[in-house]
Image (spheres, coloured by chain):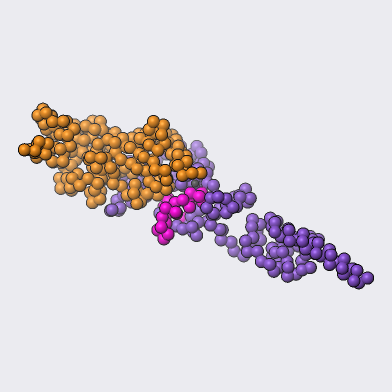
Amino acid sequence: MSAPNMAFNRIQRELAEVAKASDAEKGIVSLEAKDGRLDHLTGVIKGPPSSPYEGGTYVLDIKIPPEYPFKPPEVKFATKVWHPNVSSVTGAICLDILRTNWAAAMTLRTVMISIQALLGSPVADDPQDAVVASQFKTNRSLFDSTAKYWATTYADAPSEVPEMKEKVAQMVAMGFNESDVRDTLSWSGWDVAKALEKLAPE
Amino acid sequence: MDDTPSTSRMDDVNMDQDDPDVHAPSTSSSAFGQAETGKGEKDGEKPKENLFECNICLDSPNDPVVSLCGHLFCWPCLHGWLEMRPEGHQTCPVCKAAISREKAIPLFGRHSKGEDPRNKAVPPRPQAQRTEQTRHANFNHNPDFTPFGFGGGNNGFHMTVGFGAFPFTFFAQTFGLLEAAPGHAQQGLVSKIFLWVAIILIFALIFIDL
Ligand SMILES: [Zn+2]
Ligand SMILES: [Zn+2]
């Protein structure tokens, strides 16, 4: 059996397994092939309870290398997320099992559970996003509310963060692009003056 | 990379995947561990399917081997995994225990007799480690074929061609006094050759005596 065939057979088993398992309560919403292609999947997980991501729905972009399961899947967040171990720009995830600690017996289901666990317990000493990680270490409450604001804005989490919403609205009224404003304010620790400097130098 | 926190996460996940029936893997550290218990009924439906699946391809194993830590794989699957890792850093894909080609034990089921994986295109399984005592119970193959005869032990089972004891051994085999080991193609061929040589000898002896 050729390697890609083995990867596809396994992915098919994994899809069936996730579909029949009662994982919904655990936070795995779905795992589906993208446009019927078995090398590009979409996973959906829930933000873990008692975290700033609670109630949010997060889409994962999953690419299957031909050497799967001997090599790990390439997984990143398609939904924007404010988290020390996830790039706030690209959605890239820093998680050991997706790199050196991958093992062929792991499945996409276990990967999704691990990513959900990572959302619930960030590892600031092994950051993917330096800005977010330093905020997580130095100003935890600002980190929490920024993460919550992003969850509300991008992941349909129900909680509201009115002060942040207001600051964004204020700068959008000045003619800036809304998503640029959100990013820049977040990266500037919600200091409007600093954000203005970055968005409109001089 | 700091792998302390994430490794513990991974272990939880692995235990769950490994044998869901045994551990309700108290994922106490994470907030969603409690949901894990709902899995039991699902597994109860098809217990046999779940118990003996290869841990890599998730299918029923083909040329099964088991690691010393007890994890089941197809030999081609495990071989593929071992190939990805430098020797000395090979770990079990399930539990991360040290593992190597030498430490994988092949499993021979009732119907696996005729399928010697070493003759296949896939990488060969490691050989089973057999001891002298279990030898005559294993008719599968006899790689340590010796040209000099030795008795197979108590039950008169004979492992070799019997050059040494010729012609007695030959007669014994021919007349069924000693049982030849089944599955020895070479032995059968050699026996036939000796059969003819012996017949000629017998005739020669008879005519010389006369
Ligand atoms: Zn296999
Ligand atoms: Zn193991």
- At a point 43% along the width and 44% down the height, the residue shown is B20
* Magenta span contains residue A82: no
Q: What percent of the width, then of the height, locates residue B71?
A: 47, 51
- At a point 46% along the width and 55% down the height, the residue shown is B69
Which segment did they paint magenta? B69-95
Q: Chain A is drawn in which colour?
A: orange
**Looking at the rendering, which quadrant does residue A168 occupy?**
top left
Q: What percent of the width, then of the height, locates residue B149?
A: 71, 68
* Magenta span contains residue B70: yes
Q: Residue furthest right?
A: B210
- At a point 15% along the width and 45% down the height, the residue shown is A139
B25 or B73: which is nearer to us? B73
Q: What percent of the width, then of the height, locates residue B63?
A: 55, 49
Which chain is assigned purple?
B
Q: Which residue lies furthest to the bottom in this view?
A: B209
**Looking at the rendering, which quadrant does residue B185 occupy?**
bottom right
Q: Can residue B15 be seen in this view?
A: no
B22 or B112: which is nearer to us? B112
The answer to whether A140 appears left or right of B66 in the picture is left
The answer to whether B118 appears left or right of B161 in the picture is left
A158 or A152: which is nearer to us? A152
Q: Can residue A67 be seen in this view?
A: yes
- At a point 66% along the width and 66% down the height, the residue shown is B146
Looking at the picture, does residue B96 appear above or below residue A107?
below
